[in-house]
C-alpha cells in the first residue's frame, strides 16, 4: 500500500514538472543583414526572474514586449506569458540567439539556442513580421552605375548616394556589409569632404551626400553582379512631443538601408579587325618614344623611354616591347607609373625606361614602335606608331680596341646575332694606389666613448637645476598654449562666422566639436555616438566635469538647431566650446 501511494505521488510530481514549457521561436531562420527578426520566449506558467540572452552579434531594435494570455474552457485553464524582441544582425554568417532563463516554482528553465543564417543585404527587406520596412519617405541609399554594358577592361564607376528627406536628420552611420566586386578590378576614390547637396528623388525634394566612389574595370565577360552596400544609420525623426518651451523634440532611431544589387553585362572585344599584337589596352592613348641623346661615344649609355599616356586601363595593359640592333646592349626597363583615378577612370602615363649601351661606333637605327588599343567610343581598334630614332655612335678615344679581320667579324655576326665586338673595356693598370683600410677602431670603450660618457654625466646636475627653475616648463607651456589657440580657431572659425543664425551656428558648432573629438581620439564618423564618446574620454582620464560639459554641449547643439536662440546665447556657447576644446586637449 505504501509503495502504491509513493508511486502515485511521484507520478503527480512528474506530471506537474512535465507541464512546464519554456520555448524560444524566431520568425525566420535565414535573413539578410538589412532585415529584422522577431524572437518570442513563451512559458506556460507564471514564472519570475526572466533573463534574456545577451544577443551577441545582434542589435536590439525593440523589446521586451510582454504579453499574458489566460483562458478557461470547459473547466480547463490555460496560461502563457510571452516576451517578444525585435533584433537586427550586425554581421554576416551563421549566428545564434542564446538561451533565455526563467524561474517557475523555484526551478530554473532554459530555452534552446536558435541558429540564424545571415546573408548579404536583400533588395526588399522585412521587419521580422512579414511586412516590409517602409523607408521611402525618409532615407534612400542608391548605387549609380555609369555604364551597364561596358566592354571588357572598359572603366565604369559606381557612386553611392544617401538621400535624406527634409524632415529627417542623419547623425552618423557605419558600414554593415561592404560590396563585393567579383570579376572586377576595383579602386575606391578618396573623398576629401562629404558635401550635403540639394536634389530630388522620385520627384520629391531631398538632401543627399556622396558616400563613396569606386572605379571598376571588368576582367571577364558576361553578367557580373555588384553586391549591395549596407549601412546602419542613426536617424533623428520629429516626434509629437515638445519641450517646456514648445519646441519639437526628435526621437533617435536606428535604420538599416541598403543599395540594391546591380548587374553589369560585360561585352567581349570584337574579334573582327583585332590585330595580332593587341596589348589589351582599352581607352584612348598616345605613344611617345624619346632618347636623352642621339650622338654619343661607343660604350657610353643613353636612355630610351617608351611612354603611354591617356585615359583607360593604364595599370592593367601590356607595354610594347622595342627591338634594338644587335650591336647595342640593352638592359631590363625600369617601369614607372604616374596614374591617377577619378570617377571617369584612370588617367596619366606609364613609362618603360631602357638603358642602352652601343659597343661599336657607327650609324644605328632603332625601328619605329607600334601600339594597338581598343577605343570603346569608336568601337574599333586603333594602332599608333612612333618615329624611327637614329644614333650616331663615334669611336671612344679612351677605349682601346683590338684589330679583327672584317671578314671574320661578318661571319661571326651571321652566326650569332648577339655578337659583341672585341673591345677591351678596362682602364690601364695603375702601379700605385691610395687605398685605405675599411676596418676601423670600435667606438665602444674607445677614448671618444669615455669622453662623451663623462660629459653627459657632468651635465645631469645642470639639467636638474634648469628643470626646477621652470625655464623648460615655461617654454613648453607657451608652445602648448599657441597650439591650443590655433586648434580652437581652426575648429571654431566656421561656427563663429555664423553667430546670429541658430540653425547654421549650432550645426557648425556640433561639427566643430565632432571634428575635434575625431582628431584627438582617432575615431571615425560612425563612432561619434555620445555613449561611445563618453567611454573614450573616460579612458583618456578626462576630468569628469569637462566630460559632462562636452556631452551637454553636444546635446544642446542637437536640440538648439531647430529652435530660436539669441545672439548673446550663441556667443556664450561659442566661448564655452572654445574653453572646453582647450581644456580637453591639455588632458589628452
Image (cartoon, grey):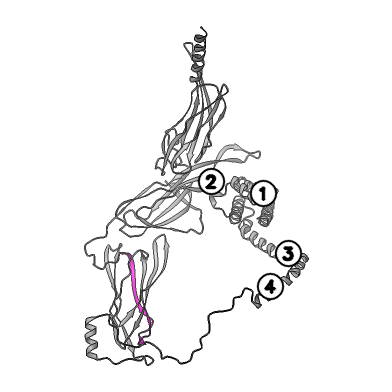
Which callout, 1 or 3, points to the residue nearer the camera?
A: 3
Which is more foreground, mark 4 or mark 2? 4
Say above or below: 79 vs 479. above
Location of the C terminus by quadrant is bottom right
Q: CA distance from mark 1 to mark 4?
A: 47 Å
Secondary structure beneath label 4: helix
Is residue 222 in view? yes
Q: 545 left or right of 78?
A: right
- Which one is in front, 104 or 145? 104
Question: Sequence-wise, which precedes: disc 3 or disc 4?
Answer: 4
User: Which percent across, then down, holds residue 437?
Assistant: 53, 83
Which dot marks residue 547? 1
Q: Position of residue 349 (x, y in %)?
A: 39, 69
Whether 286 is among the magenta residues is yes
Q: Which residue, given by chain and number where applicable, does mark 4 sit on?
A: 453
How far apart are the alpha carbons under marks 3 and 2?
46 Å
- What residue do we see at 54% from left, 79% from top? 439
Magenta span of residues: 281-304
Q: Which residue is mark 3?
A: 473
Give the secondary structure at mark 2: strand
Q: Nearer the viewer, residue 46 or 218?
A: 46
Q: Which mark is residue 169?
A: 2
Q: Which badge, 1 or 3, is on the more N-terminal residue?
A: 3
Which label sits in the foreground, 1 or 4?
Answer: 4
Amino acid at each position: 500500500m505504501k509503495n502504491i501511494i509513493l508511486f502515485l505521488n511521484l507520478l503527480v510530481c512528474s506530471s506537474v514538472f512535465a507541464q512546464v514549457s519554456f520555448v524560444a521561436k524566431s520568425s525566420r531562420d535565414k535573413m539578410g543583414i538589412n532585415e529584422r527578426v522577431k524572437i518570442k520566449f513563451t512559458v506556460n506558467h507564471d514564472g519570475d526572474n526572466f533573463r534574456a540572452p545577451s544577443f551577441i552579434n545582434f542589435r536590439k531594435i525593440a523589446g521586451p514586449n510582454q504579453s499574458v494570455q489566460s483562458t478557461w474552457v470547459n473547466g480547463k485553464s490555460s496560461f502563457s506569458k510571452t516576451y517578444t524582441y525585435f533584433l537586427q544582425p550586425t554581421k554576416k554568417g551563421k549566428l545564434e540567439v542564446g538561451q533565455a532563463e526563467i524561474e517557475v516554482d523555484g526551478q530554473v528553465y532554459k530555452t534552446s539556442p536558435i541558429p540564424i543564417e545571415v546573408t548579404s543585404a536583400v533588395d526588399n527587406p522585412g521587419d521580422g513580421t512579414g511586412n516590409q520596412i517602409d523607408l521611402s519617405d525618409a532615407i534612400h541609399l542608391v548605387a549609380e552605375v555609369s555604364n551597364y554594358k561596358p566592354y571588357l577592361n572598359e572603366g565604369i564607376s559606381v557612386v553611392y548616394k544617401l538621400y535624406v528627406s527634409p524632415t529627417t536628420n542623419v547623425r552618423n552611420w557605419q558600414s554593415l556589409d561592404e560590396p563585393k566586386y567579383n570579376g572586377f578590378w576595383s579602386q575606391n576614390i578618396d573623398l576629401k569632404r562629404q558635401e550635403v547637396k540639394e536634389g530630388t528623388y522620385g520627384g520629391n525634394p531631398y538632401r543627399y551626400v556622396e558616400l563613396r566612389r569606386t572605379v571598376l574595370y571588368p576582367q571577364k565577360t558576361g553578367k557580373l553582379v555588384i553586391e549591395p552596400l549596407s549601412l546602419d544609420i542613426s536617424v533623428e525623426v520629429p516626434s509629437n512631443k515638445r519641450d517646456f518651451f514648445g519646441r519639437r523634440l526628435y526621437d533617435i532611431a536606428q535604420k538599416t538601408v541598403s543599395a540594391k544589387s546591380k548587374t553589369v553585362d560585360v561585352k567581349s572585344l570584337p574579334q573582327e579587325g583585332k590585330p595580332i599584337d593587341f596589348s589589351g589596352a582599352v581607352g584612348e592613348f598616345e605613344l611617345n618614344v624619346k632618347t636623352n641623346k642621339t650622338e654619343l661615344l661607343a660604350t657610353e649609355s643613353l636612355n630610351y623611354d617608351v611612354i603611354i599616356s591617356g585615359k583607360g586601363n593604364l595599370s592593367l595593359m601590356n607595354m610594347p616591347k622595342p627591338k634594338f640592333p644587335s650591336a647595342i646592349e640593352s638592359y631590363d626597363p625600369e617601369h614607372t607609373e604616374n596614374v591617377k583615378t577619378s570617377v571617369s577612370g584612370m588617367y596619366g602615363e606609364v613609362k618603360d625606361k631602357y638603358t642602352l649601351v652601343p659597343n661599336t661606333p657607327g650609324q644605328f637605327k632603332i625601328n619605329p614602335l607600334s601600339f594597338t588599343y581598343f577605343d570603346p567610343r569608336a568601337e574599333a581598334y586603333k594602332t599608333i606608331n612612333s618615329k624611327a630614332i637614329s644614333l650616331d655612335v663615334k669611336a671612344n678615344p679612351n677605349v682601346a680596341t683590338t684589330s679583327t679581320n672584317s671578314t671574320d667579324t661578318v661571319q661571326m655576326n651571321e652566326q650569332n646575332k648577339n655578337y659583341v665586338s672585341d673591345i677591351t673595356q678596362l682602364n690601364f693598370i695603375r702601379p700605385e694606389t691610395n687605398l685605405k683600410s675599411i676596418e676601423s677602431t670600435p667606438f665602444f670603450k674607445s677614448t671618444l666613448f669615455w669622453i662623451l660618457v663623462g660629459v653627459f654625466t657632468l651635465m645631469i646636475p645642470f639639467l636638474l637645476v634648469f628643470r626646477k627653475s621652470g625655464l623648460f616648463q615655461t617654454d613648453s607651456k607657451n608652445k602648448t598654449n599657441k597650439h591650443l589657440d590655433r586648434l580652437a580657431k581652426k575648429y571654431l572659425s566656421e561656427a563663429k562666422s555664423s553667430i546670429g543664425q541658430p540653425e547654421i551656428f549650432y550645426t557648425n558648432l556640433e561639427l566643430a566639436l565632432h571634428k575635434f573629438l575625431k582628431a584627438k581620439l582617432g575615431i571615425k564618423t560612425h563612432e561619434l555616438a555620445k555613449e561611445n564618446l563618453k567611454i573614450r574620454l573616460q579612458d583618456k582620464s578626462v576630468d569628469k566635469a569637462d566630460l559632462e560639459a562636452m556631452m551637454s554641449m553636444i546635446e544642446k547643439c542637437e536640440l538648439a538647431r531647430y529652435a530660436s536662440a539669441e545672439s548673446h546665447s550663441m556667443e556664450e556657447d561659442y566661448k564655452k566650446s572654445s574653453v572646453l576644446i582647450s581644456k580637453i586637449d591639455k588632458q589628452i
